[in-house]
Amino acid sequence: MTDTLARPVGASVRGEASARQRSGVARDTSVDAIRIALLVVVFALHAMMFGVTMGPDGPVLENALENQAWFAPVSWVVQVMPLFFIAGGFSSLHHWRSMRSRGATPADYVRGRLGRLVRPVIAVVVVVAAGLVALSIAGVPADVVATAGFRIGQPLWFLAVYVGLSALVPLTVRAHERARVLTPLALLGAVVAVDVTRLSTGIEAIGLANLLLVWLLVQQLGFHLADGGLDRLSRRTLWGIAGGALSLLAVLTVIGPYPVDMYDNLNPPTVGLVVLGVAQLALFQLTRPRIRAWVGRADASRAIAALGDRAMTVYLWHMPVLVALAGVLLVANATFGFALPEPLSAAWWASRPLWLGVGAAAVVPVVLVFARFERGRRMSRTGSPAASAAPSNRPTAAAAWSTAFDAACGVAGVAVVLVAGFGPLQAVVALALLAIALRGSGPLLAAVQRRSR
């Protein structure tokens, strides 16, 4: 009996040690576990949004939860993007400091992050664009194809923002280290200024500035979590922070100018998401000891690390899989008369557990196939970080400008399909930009310089 009880703890320690060796960065099981939990929430929410019916004019693919009054309070629970970026900030700070201690430059860090983030999206663009073209050739109505492309592209906003934030990590970490309090306060002032200007002028485009500012600020919260600043706060203080943040959010939304629905606060991002992020951070800090204890008891660290290594693949491919399953339902309805319940009807709600289960099962083989693009060649034969993490021999200034250009191409490549869709021309442009981001613009810029001489 003693051996049986001891084995899970030992296995958990070995799992954490293995994860630490693979990444070269100290891991925190509570952060790793919450990222997987958040990914599950995102998948479940996106799956619940699918309303698939056959209307009088043909197939209908709609967001079943859109414009539902009851969903606004629910969104306070399922809007988990602030905590996603907090966890990302936690990992980014540790990762960059680990590389910096080994002599890596900021350009080395950004190049490594671009490789990890850009490779999997290239595979998505190629497969999805080819699939949508095939549907058009097969005679599927153009509006259905366009809707499918829109649904698939919706989650890509996260990747575009995350690529940009990753490229700024060396700078934002430096700001955090030099001014731990002033930096988030300055960002908060900028976020509020953007919101006030947008609301007072009615010019919605002004709010796009908060696509960067809001998530930079939330990322800073992750830096404070990583530095252990929250570990010094008592549980009473943390409960007070969480309660105060949620109370402020209620004032801002119920009485103030912001929507109660936290997803309406996402486009464009508002200070409401920052306040929600503060509440989520405090609540997460309160639950961290229990999460760590559960991971140890369940011997889940190895499984969590394996899922973490494929998290971006899951995020990028779950929507294409769900759209494909929706297409299967429409074909089954047209061919066999398979019943498609009206969204939000009793029959629709009763079918959701099966829909979620089938969707999750269908994502698994797709992730197994495409996870290789996310992992790439990140590990050498010795198990150490790949060459992308090694110190660069290029001149620092030249490397910095070239890497900044590469990061901008990565953001732009994702933005093309996010804004313009997965059409053939858009896909070609996006792939060209993503290829520059992945391979680096150094050879291209050198060729241009040679021709200009």
Image: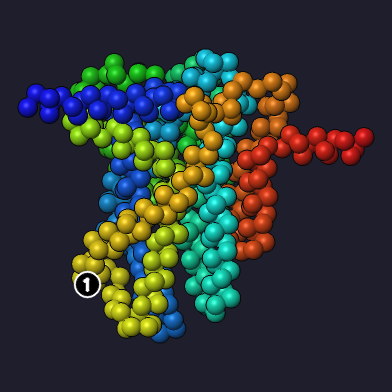
Residue annotated with mark 1:
347
| Placement of the C terminus among the 4 image quadrants | top right
Q: Quadrant of residue 362?
A: bottom left
Q: Position of residue 390 (x, y in %)?
A: 59, 23
Examine the rendering and report whether any part of residue 372 can be seen.
yes
Please identify the residue farthest to the left as the structure is shown.
1
Q: Position of residue 147 (x, y in %)?
A: 49, 67
Front residue of 298/356: it is 298
Front residue of 4/143: it is 4
Q: What residue sits 59% from the left and 27% below the top?
A: 387
In the depicted structure, whether residue 426 falls above or below residue 449: below
Amino acid type, residue under disc 1 in the picture: Ala
Q: Position of residue 386 (x, y in %)?
A: 54, 28
Q: What residue sits 54% from the left and 35% below the top?
A: 377
Q: Residues within 10 Å of mark 1 (few under 14, many from 20)?
A: few
| Placement of the N terminus among the 4 image quadrants | top left
